[in-house]
Image: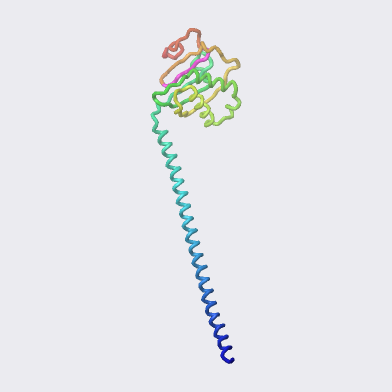
């Protein structure tokens, strides 16, 4: 009978020690899990940043390659088309565009000016409010429509004002080619040839 209390006390002490050890083990496991979680989160963050950097680098490289490809495309020197309502090459153009296309590409300047005239006849108010970039984009679309290439770079484009009663006789359209500039005249003199409507007789 007298030994049981000692066993009970001993048992309580033993259980207390075991309980402390179990709690220490649990604390250690929790601490290790926290460390592992932090390491995993940090590694994931590094991977995410690395992936983002790689993606950004890939996009940048692609954009640079695209820009370089466009910049190194075999484009001809700058050309200009001036569209004039009337028979005088000195009249203020209603449409002027400065552009570049490949050396072996060609455009129909008369069709280009006809397209610009149509734009002014139907959408002059919108064009008047457009930015230079928007005007260049509108001109680029016109050139693509009348060229045998889609590789077109428009450096500058401007729209003027058509007279109240613009000429409509396509048979009286004349062209004056002066170096890299082509002037398209709407309302050229009847029977005019290119040389006769260019300053100095150039055609």
Q: Is residue 40 left or right of residue 9?
A: left
Q: What main secondary structure does the magenta stretch of the protein show?
A: strand
Q: Quadrant of residue 198?
A: top left
Q: Is residue 146 left or right of residue 127?
A: left
Q: Quadrant of residue 178?
A: top left
Q: How many numbered dots are placed on residues in this image?
A: 0
- Farthest front residue in view: 1
- The residue shown at (43%, 36%) is 67
- The residue shown at (55%, 83%) is 11
Closer to the camera, 27 or 70?
27
- The residue shown at (53%, 22%) is 116
In the rendered image of this protein, does residue 52 appear above or below residue 153? below
> Can you give x and y, in whole percent of width and height, for residue 185 in the image?
50, 15
- What's the magenta region? 180-187
> Can you give x and y, in whole percent of width and height, for residue 108 in the image?
47, 19
- Farthest top residue in view: 191
186 in the magenta segment? yes
In the rendered image of this protein, does residue 152 appear above or below residue 173? below
- The residue shown at (39%, 25%) is 103
Closer to the camera, 67 or 182?
67
Closer to the camera, 105 or 114?
105
> Can you give x and y, in whole percent of width and height, for residue 52 in the image?
47, 49
In the rendered image of this protein, does residue 171 appear above or below residue 29? above
Q: Quadrant of the N terminus?
A: bottom right
127 in the magenta segment? no
Closer to the camera, 164 or 29?
29
In the rendered image of this protein, does residue 141 appear above or below residue 173? below
Q: Quadrant of the C terminus?
A: top left
> Can you give x and y, in whole percent of width and height, for residue 122 in the image?
60, 22
- Farthest bottom residue in view: 2
């Amino acid at each position: 009978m007298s030994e049981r209390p000692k066993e009970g006390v001993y048992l309580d002490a033993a259980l207390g020690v075991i309980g402390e050890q179990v709690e220490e083990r649990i604390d250690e496991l929790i601490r290790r899990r926290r460390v592992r979680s932090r390491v995993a989160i940090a590694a994931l963050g590094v991977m995410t940043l690395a992936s983002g950097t790689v993606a950004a680098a890939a996009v940048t490289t692609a954009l640079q390659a695209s820009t370089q490809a466009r910049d190194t495309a075999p484009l001809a020197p700058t050309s200009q088309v001036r569209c004039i309502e009337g028979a005088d090459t000195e009249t203020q153009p209603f449409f002027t565009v400065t552009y570049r296309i490949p050396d072996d590409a060609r455009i129909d300047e008369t069709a280009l000016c006809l397209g610009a005239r149509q734009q002014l006849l139907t959408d002059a108010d919108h064009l008047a409010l457009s930015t230079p970039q928007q005007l260049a984009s509108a001109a680029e679309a016109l050139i693509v429509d009348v060229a045998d290439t889609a590789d077109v770079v428009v450096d500058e484009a401007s729209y003027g004002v058509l007279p109240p009663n613009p000429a409509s006789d396509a048979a009286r359209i004349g062209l004056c080619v002066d170096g890299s500039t082509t002037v398209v005249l709407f309302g050229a003199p009847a029977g005019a040839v290119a040389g006769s409507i260019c300053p100095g007789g150039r055609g």
